[in-house]
Image (cartoon, rainbow, N blue to C red):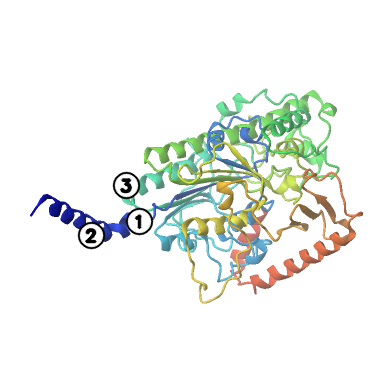
């Protein structure tokens, strides 16, 4: 056989081999891992990369090599947001706001969509989906650590691992909940690396920081001891200027809110009696406080900052584990808060010991309205309200292999119901049209995957809010919002120019108010119908759901 023929034969053989191997060669890239991180009661401007004064180098690093969304939203409260994240539905569609009985039988959680695609699923931290209490048995997670005691960071009494009760943590133990939640997440990742290295994972890392009670390691608190002595008014101004410099906001800075925020279950006199003379029950001018009040309030903000700082440190340990197992580059990481900073002032659990060091295991303090307002800069109001201060959240998105842009902002509006459609879009999932022999309603959210590639606008027909009679509806840049169920209390804002909600246009736009209020009512009724009849979880379970909702 001559040289030309030999060459031809070899070329044909190579072509045949290539054709045979083509399907494998064209195989899709490995599915991305997913790490979804939730903070609890963290304000919009708390992370340094969103204008804050708290040291958050790990979040800053993710933002610096990823994306920051400037107009993203939660439901304004812990359990409604977490249920919306995990199910993809507004909480009113699944009996989660208010929490009543069991989730509808058609309800699926994120693992139910991802596990058929080969994902291993892990949960670490706060659960709060009251109608599906068993994380592994009902929720589809392979491993879980669930904290049920939200009254103490140093010695919680009720928590479970893989749905089985763990012993109560004894006072004086070397335990801090934020660290332990990260420990569990890392433990799951290490096991995944050892036993399932070729499978993708979904890790749901749900912190309880900086939710009250304000508790943090003493060394973390000491770092911020004197940082906030200038007070909440100066803090708001400085954060606002940094937000504008970063391009996070373009609206005006809202002033001290005229809403008379109560001290919740205590009068101001009772607060002072139980906590001490430094407590303040309302958002007042910083200069009107006594020196004792100024020091006490600055100390509370120092503890809040320490809790955020410690959470950032623990996030750093989780990121280091991803890098150690060579999974960081192909992990989609998303970070949000479940609501804005909290003005709540509640004492429960072991109560408050005024003689104990603030932030210790015998102290039970809440941030309160003054610094909560500053943490939500530049917006109005707080957790539980659906004005922008209550339901605006940072959203940091990082994915080395999937997002080319670095240190970029995304201005499209979005909502936590968008997470599930985004994950379905990302993974190419095609879920079965029925679940438990029932047909679920369409998912209300939209995939934000196009915004990973550019500052694209995601078309939401509406974004709906309803929590403890605080109501809102957003259509485009128009937002209708109310503090009560009274139809006369609707306010209307053009968020394109007034996201701080300072210029109420309801009087000048009566037709728009009428149309949007009627649509809100239709949606509210529609969601109630979609939820269907309440599936009784039993008297004991209902009592537990009510108690957890109050927490």
Q: Nearer the viewer, residue 543 or 397?
A: 397
Q: Give the answer, above or below, for where 46 lies relative to 340.
A: above
Tell me the residue that label 3 is attached to: 194
Q: Nearer the viewer, residue 126 or 422?
A: 422
Distance between mark 2 and mark 1 Cα atoms: 16 Å
Q: Which mark is residue 527?
A: none
Q: Give the answer, above or below, for where 135 lies relative to 353.
A: below
Q: Secondary structure at mark 3?
A: helix
Tell me the residue that label 2 is attached to: 16
**Image coords of residue 172 (percent x, y):** 51, 35
**Image coords of residue 100 (percent x, y):** 65, 66
Residue 86 in view of the camera: no
For label 1, count other residues whose C-alpha is less than 10 Å away and answer few (under 14), some (14-19) or many (20+): few
Residue at image coords 78%, 54%: 479
Residue 413 in view of the camera: yes
Q: How many marks?
A: 3
Q: Nearer the viewer, mark 2 or mark 1?
A: 2
Most distant residue in the bottom direction:
437
**Image coords of residue 429 (percent x, y):** 47, 62
N-term mark: 3 or 1: 1
Q: Nearer the viewer, residue 76 or 267?
A: 76
Q: Nearer the viewer, mark 3 or mark 1?
A: 1
Q: Which mark is residue 26?
A: 1
**Image coords of residue 4 (percent x, y):** 14, 51
Residue at image coords 64%, 37%: 214
Distance between mark 3 and mark 1 Cα atoms: 28 Å
For label 2, count other residues whose C-alpha is less than 10 Å away and answer few (under 14), some (14-19) or many (20+): few
Q: Is residue 454 left or right of residue 515?
A: left
Q: Is the residue under label 1 in contact with that under label 2 (CB below 8 Å)?
A: no
Q: Give the answer, above or below, for where 297 lies relative to 183.
A: above
N-term mark: 3 or 2: 2
Residue at image coords 85%, 53%: 491
């Amino acid at each position: 056989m001559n040289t030309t023929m030999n060459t031809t034969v070899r070329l044909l053989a190579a072509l045949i081999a290539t054709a045979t191997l083509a399907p494998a060669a064209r195989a899709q890239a490995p599915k991305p891992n997913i790490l979804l991180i939730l903070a609890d009661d963290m304000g919009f401007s708390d992370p340094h990369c969103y204008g804050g004064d708290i040291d958050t180098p790990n979040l800053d690093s993710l933002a610096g090599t990823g994306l920051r969304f400037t107009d993203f939203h939660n439901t304004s409260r812990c359990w409604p947001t977490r249920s919306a994240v995990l199910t993809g539905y507004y909480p009113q569609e699944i009996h989660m706001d208010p929490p009543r009985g069991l989730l509808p039988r058609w309800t699926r959680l994120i693992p139910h969509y991802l596990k058929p695609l080969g994902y291993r699923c892990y949960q670490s931290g706060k659960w709060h989906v009251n109608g599906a209490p068993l994380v592994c048995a009902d929720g589809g997670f392979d491993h879980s650590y669930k904290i049920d005691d939200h009254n103490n960071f140093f010695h919680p009494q009720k928590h479970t691992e893989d749905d089985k009760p763990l012993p109560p943590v004894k006072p004086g133990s070397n335990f801090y909940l934020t660290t332990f939640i990260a420990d569990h997440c890392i433990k799951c990742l290490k096991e995944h690396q050892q036993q399932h290295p070729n499978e993708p994972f979904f890790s749901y890392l749900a912190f309880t920081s900086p939710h009250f009670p304000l508790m943090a390691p003493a060394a973390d608190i000491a770092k911020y001891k004197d940082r906030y002595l200038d007070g909440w008014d100066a803090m708001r101004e400085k954060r606002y200027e940094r937000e504008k410099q970063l391009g996070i906001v373009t609206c005006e800075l809202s002033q001290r809110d005229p809403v008379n925020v109560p001290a919740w279950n205590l009068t101001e006199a009772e607060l002072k009696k139980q906590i001490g003379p430094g407590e303040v029950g309302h958002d007042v001018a910083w200069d009107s406080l006594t020196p004792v009040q100024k020091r006490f309030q600055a100390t509370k903000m120092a503890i809040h900052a320490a809790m955020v700082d410690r959470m950032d440190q623990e996030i750093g340990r989780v990121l280091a584990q991803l890098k150690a197992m060579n999974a960081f580059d192909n992990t989609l990481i998303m970070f949000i808060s479940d609501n804005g900073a909290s003005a709540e002032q509640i004492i429960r659990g072991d109560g408050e010991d005024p003689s104990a060091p603030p932030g210790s295991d015998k102290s039970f303090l809440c941030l309160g309205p003054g610094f909560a307002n500053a943490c939500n800069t530049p917006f109005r109001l707080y957790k539980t309200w659906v004005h922008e201060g209550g339901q605006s959240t940072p959203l940091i998105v990082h994915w080395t292999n999937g997002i080319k842009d670095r240190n970029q902002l995304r201005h499209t509006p979005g909502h936590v119901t968008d997470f599930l459609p985004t994950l379905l879009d990302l993974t190419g999932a095609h879920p079965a049209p029925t679940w438990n022999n029932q047909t679920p309603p369409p998912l209300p959210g939209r995939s934000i995957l196009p915004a990973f590639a550019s500052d694209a606008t995601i078309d939401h027909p509406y974004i709906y809010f309803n929590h403890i009679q605080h109501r809102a509806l957003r259509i485009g840049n128009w937002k209708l919002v109310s503090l009560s169920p009274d139809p006369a209390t609707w306010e209307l804002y053009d968020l394109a120019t007034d996201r701080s909600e300072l210029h109420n246009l309801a009087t000048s736009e009566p037709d728009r108010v009428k149309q949007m209020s009627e649509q809100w009512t239709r949606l509210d009724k529609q969601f109630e119908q979609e939820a269907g009849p309440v599936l009784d979880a039993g008297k004991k379970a209902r009592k537990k759901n009510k108690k957890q909702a109050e927490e």
